[in-house]
Image (cartoon, rainbow, N blue to C red):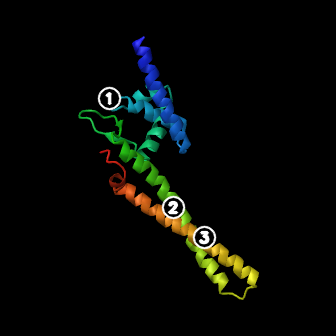
């Protein structure tokens, strides 16, 4: 009975992690892999992961690469072993920071570039001979895009706070 309750408790957390990661465009199988690794005391090989999750070694390899790219797990060295071993990074605060900053930076850069290009284009349009209606429309668009650029500049500062860990000075220090 105790073993079943222990498994139920673990499975509930693994399922929750899987669903949560799916919200952020990480496949449920990769979320399950992370959740399963979270409960392991020792680093695991791809073969051990495959056996534990009943998935192909190819799926495990893809999942491991994804989790490494997201800085959620790391490869560890074991003396005398030729296989690669992997374990969950123990600092969830840093894992959260890495995960979100990677995604935020991509979105910020893409949107800032688009805004800057559009602002330059709108300024060019405003320099042309336009009707009052077109000039007003171009000015409204310029104002909106400038506002959006300001937001992305602000969001970039938020990401800087996370990456520098200064966010922990703002929010109760959990370290």
Counting residues from the N terminus, which is met first, the one under dot 1 or under dot 3? 1
Residue at (33, 32) in percent of width and height: 43
Q: Which residue is mark 3?
A: 145
Counting residues from the N terminus, which is met first, the one under dot 2 or under dot 3? 2
- The correct choice, above or below, for 41 with respect to 175 in the image is above
Between the residue at mark 1 and the residue at mark 3, the CA separation in whole angstroms equals: 50 Å
Label 2 sits on a secondary structure element that is: helix
Q: Which residue is mark 2?
A: 108
Q: Residues within 10 Å of mark 2 (few under 14, many from 20)?
A: many
Between the residue at mark 2 and the residue at mark 3, the CA separation in whole angstroms equals: 14 Å
Q: Which residue is mark 1?
A: 41
Q: Which dot, 2 or 1, sits closer to the camera?
A: 2
- The correct choice, above or below, for 133 with respect to 67 in the image is below
Horizontal and vertical percent for residue 17? Answer: 48, 35
- Outermost residue to the left: 79
Place residue 88 in its image quadrant. Answer: top left
Q: Residues within 10 Å of mark 3 (few under 14, many from 20)?
A: some
Residue at (43, 47) in percent of width and height: 70
Residue at (33, 39) in percent of width and height: 90
Q: Nearer the viewer, residue 51 or 95?
A: 95
Q: Is residue 59 at all visible to an observer of this figure?
A: no
Q: Which dot, 1 or 3, sits closer to the camera?
A: 3
Label 1 sits on a secondary structure element that is: loop
- Would you say 86 lies left or right of 35 here? left
Horizontal and vertical percent for residue 126? Answer: 66, 83
């Amino acid at each position: 009975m105790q073993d079943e309750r222990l498994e139920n408790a673990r499975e509930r957390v693994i399922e929750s992690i899987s669903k949560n990661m799916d919200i952020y465009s990480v496949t449920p199988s990769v979320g399950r892999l992370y959740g399963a690794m979270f409960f392991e005391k020792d680093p695991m090989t791809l073969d051990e992961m495959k056996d534990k999750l009943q998935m192909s070694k190819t799926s495990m390899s893809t999942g491991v690469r994804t989790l490494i790219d997201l800085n959620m797990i790391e490869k560890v060295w074991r003396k005398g072993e030729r296989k690669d071993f992997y374990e969950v990074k123990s600092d969830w605060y840093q894992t959260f920071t890495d995960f979100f900053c990677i995604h935020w930076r991509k979105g910020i850069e893409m949107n800032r570039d688009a805004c800057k290009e559009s602002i330059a284009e709108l300024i060019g349009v405003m320099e042309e001979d336009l009707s009052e209606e077109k000039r007003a429309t171009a000015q409204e668009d310029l104002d909106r895009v400038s506002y959006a650029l300001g937001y992305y500049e602000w969001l970039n500062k938020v990401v800087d706070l996370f990456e520098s860990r200064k966010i922990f000075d703002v929010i109760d220090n959990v370290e």
